[in-house]
Amino acid sequence: MIIMKHVKTGFRVVSNPQKEFSSLSKTSLEDVVAWYMGLLLLMALAAGIAIFLFILSQTLYFDIFSKSDVNYYEVINYVLVRATSLFFMYLFLGTFMVFLIAMLLKQFFRKIRLTDFLKITCYSLSPMLLFGWVPFSAVSMLLWSIILLALGIKMHRPKLIKKDSITYREKV
């Protein structure tokens, strides 16, 4: 199942980032972006469902225990709009921000190719995608993502080659 494959890859990146970042050079940019977008869609859907259930259960609680008169038609309309807007906010910010982050940070790491930097950025945002929709976890997941980004950049920094070496002559 494709959904479970995306989630398993995300957990592998989070649990063993060195192994995943080292095998990142063998993976194409298209595969990494497809994985990222699949996981982004899944987590946006999970966030929308979570906010839908949370607000609906809160309304049911107030209806049952405070004996207030609740118009469920309006509540469900409000909750659906709120969950849908959260879903699309995840999609917009998830796609726009990954490219914005990669383009801004690429200016400081010019020796890493842009495609490699995009792959590193997508992989480093795994904690935010997997656990960022959980309430009150966004700050810790952001810090974890920054640490993964630093680790990915460190692992993909090109090695300096002396001009008089055989390897340099083969590359030119």
Image (tube, rainbow, N blue to C red):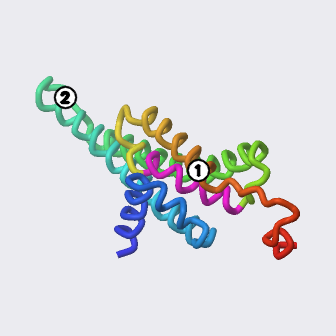
Q: Position of residue 153 (x, y in %)?
A: 63, 50
Identify whether 147 is placed above or below 126. above
**Disc 2 designates what residue?**
62
Binning the other alpha carbons within 10 Å of mark 1 as few (below 14), some (14 to 19) or many (20 upward) gives few
Front residue (pair 88, 8): 8
**Disc 1 designates what residue?**
92
Q: SS of the residue at dot 2? A: helix
Identify whether 157 is placed above or below 22. above
Residue at image x 55%, y 47%?
151
Q: Position of residue 43 (x, y in %)?
A: 41, 54
Q: Position of residue 127 (x, y in %)?
A: 44, 47
- In this view, the residue farthest toward the top is 66
Front residue (pair 109, 84): 109
Quarter-wise, where is residue 16 in the image? bottom left
**Please, what is the three-letter code of the amino acid marked with disc 2?**
Phe
Question: Which SS type dominates the magenta stretch?
Answer: helix
Q: SS of the residue at dot 1? A: helix
Residue range corresponding to the magenta coloring = 115-129
Figure label count? 2
Residue at image x 24%, y 33%?
58
110 vs 21, left or right, is right
